[in-house]
Amino acid sequence: MRRQASQDKLEMTGSAEQYAIELDKKMKTLTGKLKASGVLTNKDYNFKYVVVLHVDSAGGIPIPMMTKVTAFGGVMDMDTRKIVSYIEKDLTLSQDAILAQMPIEMNKIIAELLDKPEEA
């Protein structure tokens, strides 16, 4: 997704297409299990959009007790296999609290991707 977005290609083509196909298969498997367990009662329901996020370590000047990362990802339309929203952010996280900070930061990114105000 990052490569596609950096090249201004919203369609998941080339090697990215295989990832989109695999993601679609996994989402259909998950949806089938949710229907079978009764969590989803509408048997015709299928997820249309999927949020994809990834975090890589980032370079730069080292800061004691801190870790720099780049979070990136987006929202993909599963029907068209197109990126409908993309984001990339550099974050500086405390090494001692990274496991606590990561979900908070990812939720902020998801809120921004979905164009919703973040929760306090």
Image (tube, rainbow, N blue to C red):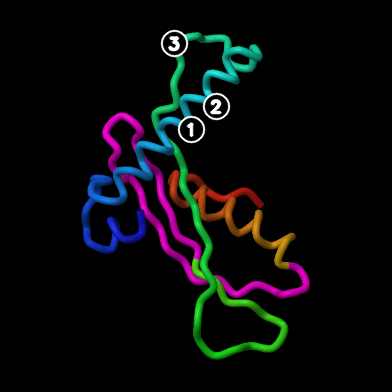
Label 3: state its secondary structure.
Answer: loop
Give whichever of discs 2 and 3 has the lower sequence position: 2
Indicate the amino acid at tag 3.
Answer: Asp
Q: Which residue is mark 3?
A: 44
Q: Which residue is mark 1?
A: 26
The chief SS type of the magenta part is strand
Q: Quadrant of residue 30?
A: top right
Q: Is residue 75 above or below residue 56?
A: above
Q: Which residue is mark 2?
A: 30
Q: How many marks?
A: 3
Q: Residue at x 76, y 68 (%)?
A: 97
Question: Toward the viewer: 75 or 20?
Answer: 20
Q: x, y (%) of residue 64?
A: 69, 88
Q: Residue at x 33, y 43 (%)?
A: 18
Q: Residue at x 40, y 44 (%)?
A: 75
- Frontmost of labels 1 and 3 is 1
Q: CA distance from mark 2 to mark 1?
A: 6 Å
